[in-house]
Amino acid sequence: MAEEEEKKSRFNFKKIALFGLGPIVLVGIGLGIGAFLFMPTQTPVEQVEELIAKKLEQAGQLPSTEGEGEEMAEPQKVAKETPATQTFVTSYYTFPDDFTTNLKGSSAFLKISVGVSTQYDATVVENVEMHQLALRSEVLGVISEHTAEDIEGKEGRDALAENIRLALNKRLEDLEGFGGVEGVFFTSFVLQ
């Protein structure tokens, strides 16, 4: 009887091994074959790069590649046109004679040569030449309002030049309706 039970337990073990493990092995083989046949050969990074390359190619920003196995081409640099910048030409005019006048509250006098600049058209220079007499009077009036201490140093000279510029523009606006003098320069500057 013990032999019969031993045979039955062996038989049951064989049945369990055959019917239990058999389907598991078959399912494993099926999954392996399916994964081999249907899984992509590219990594996710490569798939994303391929999608981006296709989108760029469709948009015309990337040249098409001629083969699947080739490396992805680098995007071409597209030259952009630079807009033409309008450059302004600065025109200069120097008054032909020096300006000499006494300074306010002293016996000292100032002798300067004055030039003006503009980036407007030639009309401003023509207006300065045409109204030179009135403009000379304005410059002499501005100089005579300053003291020797007012015009000492670079800051004093810059302030004097700015005051002359404002006076010239005001007179030109009165005479011609437009000033246009943008800078006043001293080509000589003698204080005695």
Image (cartoon, rainbow, N blue to C red):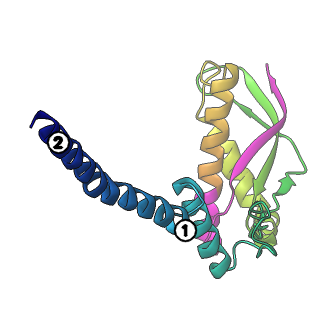
Image quarter where the N terminus lies is top left
Pointer 2 or 1: first along the chain = 2
> x, y (%) of residue 120?
73, 67
Label 1 CA crowd tier, 10 Å (few <14, some 14–19, many 20+): few
The span from disc 2 to disc 1 (Cα, nearest Å) is: 41 Å
Residue at the extreme left: 1
Residue 68 to residue 181: above or below: below
| Quarter assignment of residue 23 | bottom left
Q: Amino acid at mark 2?
A: Ser
> x, y (%) of residue 128?
77, 63
Residue 96 to residue 81: above or below: above
Q: Amino acid at mark 1?
A: Leu
Residue 165 shown left or right of residue 97 in the figure: left
- Name the residue that disc number 2 marks: 9
Residue 17: say if magenta.
Answer: no
Q: Secondary structure at mark 2?
A: helix
Which one is in front, 10 or 143? 10
Mark 2 touching mark 1, by CB under 8 A?
no
Residue drawn at x 77%, y 41% as measured from the top left: 185
Please identify, in this view, whether the residue under mark 2 or under mark 1 is nearer the observer: 2
Residue drawn at x 59%, y 75% as measured from the top left: 55
| Quarter assignment of residue 77 | bottom right
- Name the residue that disc number 1 marks: 37
| Magenta-tinted stretch | 169-192
> x, y (%) of residue 19?
26, 58
